[in-house]
Amino acid sequence: MSTIRDVANRAGVSIATVSSVINNSRPVSEKTRRQVESAIRALHYVPNRAARSLKSGRAGVIVYVVPTVTNVVFGHLFEEIQTQLDEHGYSLAIFANRVDPRETRSYMATLTRSNTDGVIMTQTGTCGRIIAEACRSRGIPLAIIQAPDTIEGVSMVVSNEEEGAMMAVDHLVQCGHRNIGIVMDGNSRVHLRRFNGYRTAMERHGLQVNEDSVVDAQGHSEECARRSLMQHLSSRALAFSGLICCNDYMALGALRALQQHGYTVPKDVAVLGFDNSISDYMIPSLTSVEFARAAMAKAVVRNLLQQIGEEERAPVVKVVYSPRLVVKGSTVPADS
């Protein structure tokens, strides 16, 4: 097994320089960094994180708290965050909280500065506040990514939900649609922000929003959207030619409901989703609003490491990223 001394000898630098490159602890010239990284790859050197943790007094572990692991949106965020943390020698653990206050309190009671260096969460409401208070009382750095609630004293990195919904409406209007509906969960604060953007854009285009164009799925899932839209379409005439769904799973449920009622997408109804998580697995492929996952992961990791002490201490910030619209077959016919 190769050692840090072997890497230093191969790269022609000191052990301290190799350590600086691995830990990103002090400036190193780009040429020297490439030499060290090349030696690391050639020797298949793996830093001993346990030894580094003993020396630094840090656990080398960041915990990422999510509401569920069944939604691939959180899986994509986990991968992006892990990629960023790998560069700084940290491991990433995931905790699916299931939005249960008792479970949250129980889990947070096990976290200390000795077993985790920081927490990133995509968590909202009561559970988010429980996590924030537990981290504050234990001195554990905390940052929020892609969650709707602002918690005093906690930095957060989010996507501009209203802007994303306005992009969606603008796109459907450009495709020639004047009657545009939305499928949402009326209890979701994220969906309400998307609805506000939808309503703002509709008003800007002089278009009406009424009860025939809003479907409350009372949940985030594919089945909630399918069932609610089936009932909606069974009780009234089709009132929209364009339909915005507040996540990709709900868009999948909407596609199924429309097809069961005999409608073709996008010929009869253009369908648009949010998150661009499973869009390529649908037929037709789904146009979707995509948030800036990589940039947001980089920003939240940077802030957390600043809190931990890797860099100068970070102020409490709120960073908002603009999303982008990824146009595919569910809104634009293949021959258009």
Image: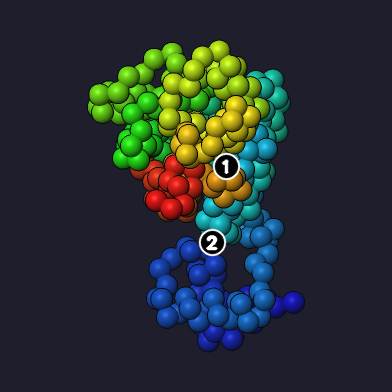
> Which of 122/71 is in front?
71
Q: Residue at x 61, y 48 (%)?
A: 281
Tag 2 and tag 1, C-beta contact below 8 Å: no
Circle 2 residues within 10 Å: few <14, some 14–19, many ≥20: few
Q: From the viewer's perspective, is residue 335 above or below residue 9?
A: above
Residue 73 in view here: yes
Q: Nearer the viewer, residue 276 or 159?
A: 276
Q: Which mark is residue 87?
A: 2
**Where does the image place residue 58, in percent across and percent down from the top left?**
60, 50
The amino acid at mark 1 is Val
Q: Residue at x 54, y 61 (%)?
A: 87
Left/right placement of residue 154 relative to residue 278 reads left
* Picture disc at residue 20: none
Residue 273 percent location from the top left of the image = 49, 37
Which amino acid is tagged 2? Glu
Q: Earlier in the sequence, mark 2 or mark 1?
A: 1
For image coordinates 37% across by 37% down, the residue present is 172
Give the residue displayed 43% in from the left and 25% down from the top.
240
Report x, y in % for residue 50.
Answer: 69, 58
In the rendered image, which residue does mark 1 sit on? Answer: 73
Vertical relation: 278 (above or below) 111: below
| Figure quadrant of the N terminus | bottom right
Q: Secondary structure at mark 2?
A: loop
Looking at the image, is mark 2 or mark 1 nearer the viewer?
A: 1
Residue 75 drawn above or below residue 255:
below
Q: Residue 280 location in percent, x, y?
A: 57, 50
